[in-house]
Amino acid sequence: MNNIVKNIIHQIFPISDQSFLEIDKLLEIESYSKGETFISKNKRDEKEYFVISGICKSYLINPDGDEVTISLFAENSILSPQSIRTSNNISNLNFKALTKVELVSMNAKEFENLMIESIEIRQFGSTVLQNELIAKVEKEIGLASLTAKERLIEFRKTHHLLENLIPHTDIASYLGITNISLSRLRKELSR
């Protein structure tokens, strides 16, 4: 587990072994079954999370009661930072396991204290936040400026193999299209 977290961190922003040992002291393992919501909107959430294995999503419920997929997270990634997915430590989103998921979590306040003490850890945390904001803006631009077909092509580039691992309803929702449209586009692109 520790090596996986260390590798995730180093892919984002390399830190020294000493800095990693400080983070490592905060880490706890969590496991969730497929279909389990592990963070609920309007509930307290005071953690940061690394996705060690599996696939999960952030989502909201629309007025019709349907799940609207906001983001997807595969293994070897980090969930949206706590500071932007919560307001006053209350979650603004739901997070659900789309497959069996193993996470490593740490208390967000304790991690924030490490960022104050260590420039390396602060730079890592800032890079995570910056990457998340860039991904959100790119998704917004794509939803506003690309055709559904172009969005699916970009999804395939960004989220290799997820199309074969998670429900197509989640992919369609993420792309801002209906499941029927996704099915039609998939057939069109396979020709």
Image (cartoon, rainbow, N blue to C red):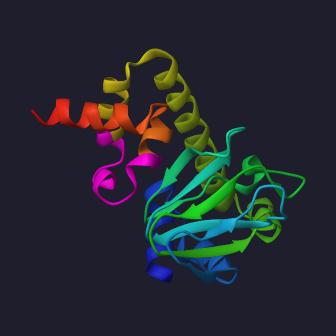
Specify the principal SS of the magenta part.
helix
Q: Is residue 157 magenta?
A: yes
Instruction: Tell me where residue 3 sits by quadrant.
Output: bottom left
Residue in the image at 42% along x and 45% along y: 171
Above or below 149: residue 43: below
- Tell me if 123 is positioned left or right of 52 in this view: right
- Tell me if 39 is positioned left or right of 164 in this view: right
Above or below 43: residue 134: above
- Tell me if 1 is positioned left or right of 113 in this view: left
Instruction: Spot the residue most to the right.
Output: 88
Query: Which sits in the foreground, 179 or 68?
Result: 179
Residue in the image at 79% along x and 64% along y: 45
Residue in the image at 85% along x and 64% along y: 44
Above or below 144: residue 28: below
Residue in the image at 77% along x and 49% along y: 92
- Looking at the rendered image, the quarter that the C terminus falls into is top left
In x, y percent, where is residue 9? 51, 64
Query: What range of the chain is rendered magenta?
Result: 156-170
